[in-house]
Image: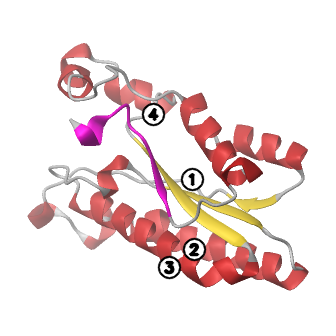
Amino acid sequence: MLARALQSCERQKRRQSLPEKGVIRGKAVEKNKVSNWSLDVNFGAVLHVSQIVARQMIAQGVPGAIVNVSSQASKRAVRDHAVYCSTKSALDMLSKVMAMELGPHKIRVNTVNPTVVMTDMGRINWSDPQKSAAMINRIPLGKFAEVDDVVNSILFLLSDKSAMTTGSSLMIDGGFLVS
């Protein structure tokens, strides 16, 4: 997913950041151990990459956009995912603060917040109809997101078509949060 977005952005010759790796380890909060925490990947790595990109953009006087990949889980509690939901919520707030602080440099910062995405991992984890039915039934559009749904949303936020959009979270959830 990241590779496709970066290829398209390279054609547009714009500066941007697309940190996209996430870690999900489902465990009840009382059973989580420090080794299960995904803070470094879901939050720390994104902060680090965003800082590097922002510093370079500011130093070069280059306007542009940073899009961080969050999750619908940042907006709604998910049982056995306390750490994941919390790190994604932290990422959303980080992106809002970055939007406020980087705006004067003409750098926009937003997040995309997808539902389950049918990547290879998504297909492995959600291919069982018995497991996926409960989740899909809560999505008004009745399906999970495809990689292109996320990539196209990122490309929109990186483009001049969203020139007045900053500090926002774009839900790519088929309506899950309104259900």
Seen in the image, is 53 located left or right of residue 41? Answer: right
On the image, the x and y values in percent for residue 71 come to 40, 50
- The label number, if any, that marks residue 117 in the structure image: 4
Q: Earlier in the sequence, mark 2 or mark 1?
A: 1
Q: N-terminal of the two: label 1 or label 4?
A: 1
Question: Which numbered disc covers residue 97?
Answer: 3
* Whole-percent x, y for residue 141 in the image: 34, 22
Per the model, the C-alpha gap separating discs 4 and 3 is 27 Å
Calculate the distance from the C-alpha at mark 4 to the C-alpha at mark 2.
26 Å
Characterize the local packing of mark 1: few (<14), some (14-19) or many (20 or more) Cα atoms within 10 angstroms.
some
Q: Quadrant of residue 75?
A: bottom left
> Residue at the left extreme?
30
Q: CA distance from mark 2 to mark 1?
A: 18 Å
- The residue at which mark 1 appears reads as 20
What is the distance, in whole Å, between disc 1 and disc 4 at their CAs?
Answer: 12 Å
Q: Give the residue drawn at x 61%, y 76%.
A: 48
Which residue is denoted by mark 2 in the rendering?
A: 99
The nearer-to-camera label among 3 and 1 is 3
Q: Residue at x 80, y 47 (%)?
A: 9
Confirm or deny contact between disc 3 and disc 2 (CB under 8 A): yes
Side (left or right) of 174 relative to 27: right
